[in-house]
Amino acid sequence: MRKPILTIFLLLFTLTVFAQKEFPRNLTSFDFKRIHFGFTVGLNVMDLGFTRNYDYSSEIPGQEFRYADLTHLQPGFQVSIVSDLRLSQNWNLRFLPGISFGSREIWFYNYEDGVVGDPVDIPHVANPVPLGPAFLDFPLHFKYRSVRVNNYRPYLVAGLNFRYDMSAKKPGFYDQDSEEYLKFKRGDLYFEFGFGVDNYLKYFKFAPEIKLAVGLMNMIDPKGRVGHPDFAASIEHARSYIIMLNFHFE
């Protein structure tokens, strides 16, 4: 028991000494700029949270409740422009318009007596439903920065982001030659929050950042396709989630 405690004590002592040791500071006047710009590149994974309509029922054969799920998370990426306004010593307002790409697949399964069965197999009905969103992003964030230690400055960030899916088709419109039986709305408002660390390098500032985006709207288009309304009716609410790993260059 004493050995782990001693190890933790030595680690904390080492970190404290390291933090107190002074190093030559880079970009000493950077934090006093009223406005500065940069760019961001990053990776993402997009998920969906479903509230299912278990009470859905239909007297038409083949139009029963369908269990929807997103079983595999697939990577995507995003790029954006950074516009940063200094509000005070610790607070900044940031606008980061950009574009993000991702991939999601919704699978529908047979469901009976509380048991999820095999994937639904209906001729000329797409299963899984491929969703490859291409979002225009319009995030507006507040950034709170801690005290700078040498060439590092941890921070928290939070704000809202309106995303518009350029790849989504008109809600309620179904191409008769397609196999689409489910549509998503084009726009959604997200609450985003995360943390990162500003690293002051010799010529620019580099900041890795982890951020979570939570959609605030129901993305399901309730108007299902004529002949198979059960796919849309089986989902009461679908909320979007995005996890991002960003790299800011400013």
Image: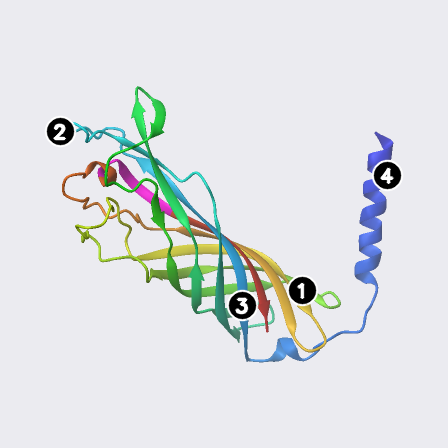
- Depth-wise, is mark 4 or mark 2 nearer the camera? 2
Say left or right for 225 vs 71: left
- Depth-wise, is mark 3 or mark 4 nearer the camera? 3
Q: Amino acid at mark 4?
A: Leu
In the image, 33 versus 225, the foreground residue is: 225
- Depth-wise, is mark 1 or mark 3 nearer the camera? 3
Considering the whole magenta stretch, tell me its main secondary structure: strand
Q: Which mark is residue 40?
A: 3
Q: Secondary structure at mark 2?
A: loop
Q: Would you name the residue on which mark 4 appears?
A: 6
Residue 88: within the magenta?
A: no
Of labels 4 and 1, earlier in sequence is 4
- Depth-wise, is mark 2 or mark 3 nearer the camera? 2
Q: Would you name the residue on which mark 2 appears?
A: 60
Of labels 1 and 3, earlier in sequence is 3
Q: Secondary structure at mark 1?
A: strand
Q: Amino acid at mark 3?
A: Thr
Residue found at x 22% / y 58%: 170
Q: Residue 92: x, y in percent?
A: 53, 69
Q: Quadrant of the C terminus?
A: bottom right
Q: Amino acid at mark 1?
A: Arg
Of labels 4 and 2, earlier in sequence is 4
Quadrant in which residue 230 is drawn: top left
Q: Find out whether the residues at labels 3 and 4 contact each other: C-beta distance under 8 Å.
A: no
Q: Amino acid at mark 2?
A: Ile
Q: Would you name the residue on which mark 1 appears?
A: 153
Q: Is residue 234 above or below residue 185?
A: above
Q: Which residues are magenta?
A: 233-239
Distance, label 2 to label 1, CA atoms, is 62 Å
